[in-house]
Amino acid sequence: MKNKADSLSDPRLIAALDTSSLDAAQKLIRQLQGLVDFYKIGFELFTAFGWKAAELVRKSGGKIFLDLKLHDIPSTVSKTAAVICEHEIEMFTVHTLGGFEMMQQVCETVEKRPRGGKKRPRILGVTILTSHTQESLSKEMGIGRNLDEQVLHLAGLAKKAGLDGVVSSPQEISLLRAGFPKDFLIVTPGIRPQGSPQGDQKRTYAPKEALGAGADFIVIGRPITAAENPRKETLNILNSLQR
Ligand code: C5P
């Protein structure tokens, strides 16, 4: 029989394990047991503990989204993708600004890898970070297109190269949904439940709004990890999705 927590849990919620302590990661996974089973491992934890961090999530029965935003020459990134394929990873990221050839080589490498019973990881392309604004895009980075158009352009490049989906801010979800097939995944960070501090995130939505706009997955970090009671905050988020 399902307990109350199981019936609240939502497979579309990914919690970001943004910590440099394996103990803290372990504690968070324990606190969120029954509520979350999909975890994002990013630079901080991966730089500190590498595959040990992934093992921790696996042992808890959770799925892994490895968010390393790989961005280098095609050969380097595709060889790195081959290493990632040795592990049980649900999804991983490359940066679309690495270009078409880079993304295409990653897809070819992943496709060719012997699976050995493992599922093929889904490959996502990061478009424009949720911490950017129109102003930082044009004035700092010198990108002439407007932000929405740039996201659509990069998503188009990712799709053409064979990627499974993109990571983008919630503010571009509707545009992406309208322009791409339903099975093209949209994963969105920049999620802020009502009352949560924005931090460095600029293009944000509340969890329910982001899913309502058509996101396949929402990624939530600090609103959960920095909460006094991460389990209670996660329950609040999950309740807000059901209202
Ligand atoms: O703490 P917060 O909820 O802002 O965390 C968002 C997470 O999503 C971070 O781990 C960050 O690295 C990641 N992310 C992001 N924007 C992207 C891609 C990933 O914020 N475009």
Image: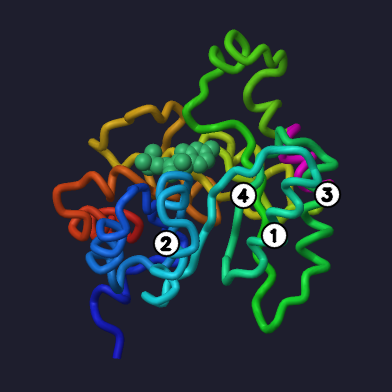
User: Measuring 71% from the left and 13% from the top, which residue is drawn there?
Assistant: 144
The tag earlier along the polypeptide, 3 or 2, is 2
Residue pointed to by mark 3: 104
- CB of residue at label 4: within 8 Å of ligand 1? yes
Amino acid at dot 1: Asp
Relative to 163, is 98 above or below?
A: above
| Disc ID at residue 53 | 2
Residue at numbered disc 1: 183
Residue at coordinates 66% horizontally, 75% vertically from top-left? 119
Q: Amino acid at mark 3?
A: Gln
Mark 3 vs mark 2, CA separation in Å = 28 Å
Sequence-wise first label, 2 or 1 = 2
**Can you identify the residue that label 4 sits on?**
93
Spot occupied by residue 43 in the image (x, y as percentages of width and height): 47, 45
What residue occupies the far bottom of the structure in this picture? 1
Quarter of the image with the C terminus in it: bottom left
